[in-house]
Image (cartoon, helix red, strand yellow):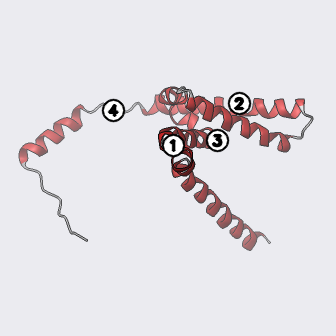
Amino acid sequence: MVNKKKKSLNQRQKKYQKMAKKEEPKPAYLSNALRAFFFGGLVAIIGQIFTDFYRLTFDMDTQEAGNPAVATMIFLGAMLTGLGVFDKIARFAGAGVTVPVTGFANSVASAALEYKKEGFVFGVGSKMFTLAGSVITFGVVTAFIIGLIYAIFIF
């Protein structure tokens, strides 16, 4: 492994970096947080509407109705990504629309769209879970560890 030392900056470069840092626009933390909170709540309300719809229409209990509601939210997230609308919404709404279900659908659909020119198997099929694969792995491992802790300390 090559050991590279970081090149020290001369006085002029340091002065430029200091000036650039001072002119850099400051993020609007409060408005970003409020928009994320509002749109995250809106996504949750839409999910609840689908849950209630499936519960009342198909005479399901709340837990059973959650599965088709989640599938519908994933479908909507992927469809909006495919139509190019999800990114526009996310640019304005911020982290609020990247809640696990819609954010997962967006990451899978985005990767699939990006690599579709490489074909269905080597492009879409293999690259679709590039980002989502690590999320799934992290979720499974975390669930296992929490389940193990629960089994050891609760039982």
* Disc 4 residue type (three-letter): Lys
Measure the alpha-carbon separation of dots 4 and 3: 30 Å
Query: Badge 2, how many Cα within 10 Å: few under 14, some, many 20+?
Result: few
Measure the alpha-carbon separation of dots 1 and 3: 16 Å
Question: For this view, does 153 lie left or right of residue 79?
Answer: right
Q: Secondary structure at mark 1?
A: helix
Residue topped by disc 3: 101
Residue at left 54%, top 33%?
36
Of 140 and 113, nearer the camera is 113
Query: Badge 3, how many Cα within 10 Å: few under 14, some, many 20+?
Result: some
* Disc 3 residue type (three-letter): Val
Query: Badge 4, how many Cα within 10 Å: few under 14, some, many 20+?
Result: few
- Asked which quadrant contains residue 105, the reply is top right
Quadrant including the N terminus: bottom left
100 versus 47 height, above or below:
below
Image coordinates for residue 67, horizontal then vertical, percent:
78, 43
Residue topped by disc 2: 45
Question: For this view, does 23 lie left or right of residue 15?
Answer: right
Measure the alpha-carbon separation of dots 2 and 1: 27 Å
> Which label sits in the foreground, 2 or 4?
2
Image coordinates for residue 69, horizontal then vertical, percent:
76, 37
> Which label sits in the foreground, 4 or 1?
1
- Among numbered discs 2 and 1, the one appearing first in the sequence: 2
| Marker disc for residue 26 | 4
Measure the alpha-carbon separation of dots 2 and 4: 32 Å
> Which label sits in the foreground, 2 or 1?
1
137 versus 92 height, above or below:
below
- Among numbered discs 2 and 3, the one appearing first in the sequence: 2
Residue topped by disc 1: 111
Q: Secondary structure at mark 2?
A: helix
- Among numbered discs 1 and 3, the one appearing first in the sequence: 3
